[in-house]
Structure formats: C-alpha cells, structure tokens
Image (tube, grey):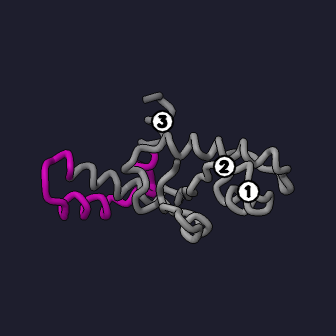
Amino acid sequence: MTNGLFLAFAEMLYGDEADADAAEQAFNSTDGTFLERITAAINALLRPHLRPESFIEVPENPEQMARADLDALVRPVADGFLRSQPTKDELPSQIRRIARRQASRPPWYRGPTAQVSAMARTRPGSSPGRSR
C-alpha cells in the first residue's frame, strides 16, 4: 500500500465525514470473529464514498456490431476519454479496455455497488454480470 492510498483511507475512516455511529452499529450487529466485525465496521465507513460501477456483457465479435449499437453499449461504461462521435474503429478498442478492466476485478467485487448495463440485461443469450 502506498502512503497516498493509506492517507486517503485514513481521511475516509477518521475524517469529519466519517460516520462512527454507523461503524459502531455495523461492528456490534455483526456476528463472527473480530476480523468479520471490524470488516463490517470499515465497510460501513467506506460505503458512502463508493460510486456504482457498471459492467457490460462484452460481445465476442464487436467488429460485427453496428456503430450505433457499439456506441450505446460502450458509452455508459467508457474507460477513459471517449469522443462524442467515435468512429466504428475506435469502439472495439474501447470494448477491449473495458473487458480488461472488468476482468481485473475479483469475482466478489460485483456486489451491492455493481450494476449491469440495461443493454446487457436485455440482449438474448446474455448473462448479466459476467464478462467473456
């Protein structure tokens, strides 16, 4: 862990916006070992700072999709900068970046803050929350 990361966590855990009551309630209401209880307390402190992260069902052959369909799939979860009118050649590289980001997340990560895009949920044969 870097010093910067530690300081960022420390600010969230000990700063003025930290909700000590929520942490104490989570700690006291969790059954189990000390580690399980302290984890619940830390989660209660960190959860308000999290932003939902969206996941998409990554198509096997994005090059075969229409530009408009690719754009609609990619735009809500774009990785980095995406031009307002990307070319069809730019979108498959964006899909590959998104796939790498999603693959780097641990399996347990897609918890309460994860969302699967509406397009992924409605596409036939899709399996929400899983990337290929």
Magenta-colored stretch includes residue 89: no
Of helix, strand and loop, which one carries label 1?
loop
Tell me whether circle 1 and circle 2 mark residues in contact (CB < 8 Å).
yes
**Residue type highlighted by circle 2:** Asn
Q: Which residue does the numbered mark 1 point to in the structure image? A: 65
**Mark 1 or mark 3, which is nearer the start of the sequence?**
3
Percent from the top left, x then y, of residue 66?
Answer: 78, 59
Q: Nearer the viewer, residue 129 or 35?
A: 129
| Mark 3 surroundings within 10 Å by alpha-carbon count, few (fewer than 14), some (14 through 19), many (20 or more) | few
Left or right relative to 127: residue 120: right
Left or right relative to 32: residue 123: right
By secondary structure, the bulk of the magenta-drawn segment is best described as helix
Q: Residue at x 72, y 63 (%)?
A: 72
Percent from the top left, x then y, of residue 117?
Answer: 58, 64
**Residue type highlighted by circle 1:** Met
| Mark 2 surroundings within 10 Å by alpha-carbon count, few (fewer than 14), some (14 through 19), many (20 or more) | few
Q: Which segment did they paint magenta? A: 11-36
Q: Which residue does the numbered mark 2 point to in the structure image? A: 61
Quarter containing the N terminus: top left
CA gap between label 2 and label 3 equals 38 Å
Q: Residue at x 16, y 47 (%)?
A: 34
Q: Which residue does the numbered mark 3 point to in the structure image? A: 5
Percent from the top left, x then y, of residue 88?
Answer: 82, 50
Residue sticking out furthest to the top: 2
Residue sticking out furthest to the left: 32
* Foreground disc of the pair 3, 1: 1
Percent from the top left, x then y, of residue 103?
Answer: 50, 42
